[in-house]
Image (cartoon, rainbow, N blue to C red):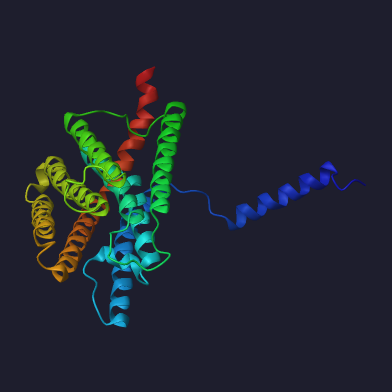
Amino acid sequence: MSIFDTRIVESGVERIRRFADEHVEPRRRGDTIDTYRNIRVGLVSLVLMLGVAIAVDSIEAGRIESSISRYYYTSVHAVFIGALCATGAMLMAYKGRSEVEDVLLNYAGFLAFLVAFIPTPVGSPPPGFTSPDWVRWNVWAAFAATAAGLVLWFVFGRLRGYASSPHRTWAGIVARGLGVLAVILVLVRLSGHWTWIPGSTHDVAAVSMFIGLILVVFFNGLAALADRGADDVHSWYPWAYAVIAAVMALTLLGIICVHSASQSWVFWVEVALLAEFATFWVVQTLELWDDEESAALVERQDAEQRPEDDR
């Protein structure tokens, strides 16, 4: 009897199917919502991971570096790059509640990769930590991966359809323009031009990223204000977002102003900025935890209603 006898193959397939039916749970409707929530919780965990790594290194070394970026050259090296890259991926994957917020999240997420790959300059970096060629190769790898992702998104969207119809607003167009400008500034500085711009290439990427995040908080507050119903006119979320955005803007201004005045102060201002954005993310998670499920229900109802409307 041949080992490839059809009956043997069919029997094996049937056993595998029965095993799957008994031990593997089918996909549930709530899985997508849980994935959405996991992204929200995961981003806060990444910030905490970076904070713990910095705290451990500072305790072991008996000193605090002049900025968070300088921990690139310490034992935090792997965590620093990994946390920024994972955060960037999550920001790009997360769908904003408005077009302009979604655009800003995408550009801030991409800039997070550049912040991770382009180290802040130091007087005498440890051997093996930095190479101009390596930095450029990593940056171009980020561009290549992003371009491939955009192509796949467009192809699948055209072939299988989008969950939500793409639309354009003037605010979104302006946000795209500012995002492209920020990326161009980083690339030009990386190539050694436009040295009149203050700060290093890393600084340009980091400041641009934080400006994008501050605008995310601001426009999210506007969207939250517009989304309020008649029964929640006293909701505190829009005002919380406004306060966080204002505090983040003042903190970023503090980084720029004290960068040359007090090096030790820069570290704490950066810590405050990260903590403020993490606070915003936690507050938004509280606001949208159940709202995402309601939105998913509405989208399913619209999808079910659409075929009837087409007839």
Measured along the vertical axis of the image, is residue 188 above or below residue 236? above
Q: Is residue 53 left or right of residue 252?
A: right
| Up-down relation of residue 210 to residue 125 (above or below) | above
**Would you say 177 lies left or right of 187 here?**
left
Q: Is residue 279 above or below residue 96?
A: below
Whole-percent x and y of residue 80? 34, 63
Asked whether residue 5 appears in the rendered view, the answer is yes
Along the viewing direction, whichever of 76 and 33 lies nearer the viewer: 76
Residue 99 can be seen, yes or no: no
In percent of width and height, residue 211 lies at 17, 48
Work out whether residue 125 or residue 287 is closer to the camera in this orientation and state it.
Answer: 125
Identify which residue, 157 or 189, lies in the foreground.
189
Q: Position of residue 237 (x, y in %)?
A: 13, 53
Q: Which residue is depicted at the point 29% across and 63% down? A: 47
Q: Residue furthest right?
A: 1
Say left or right for 19 vs 289: right
Is the C terminus in the top left, top right, bottom left or bottom right quadrant? top left
Q: Nearer the viewer, residue 281 or 16?
A: 281
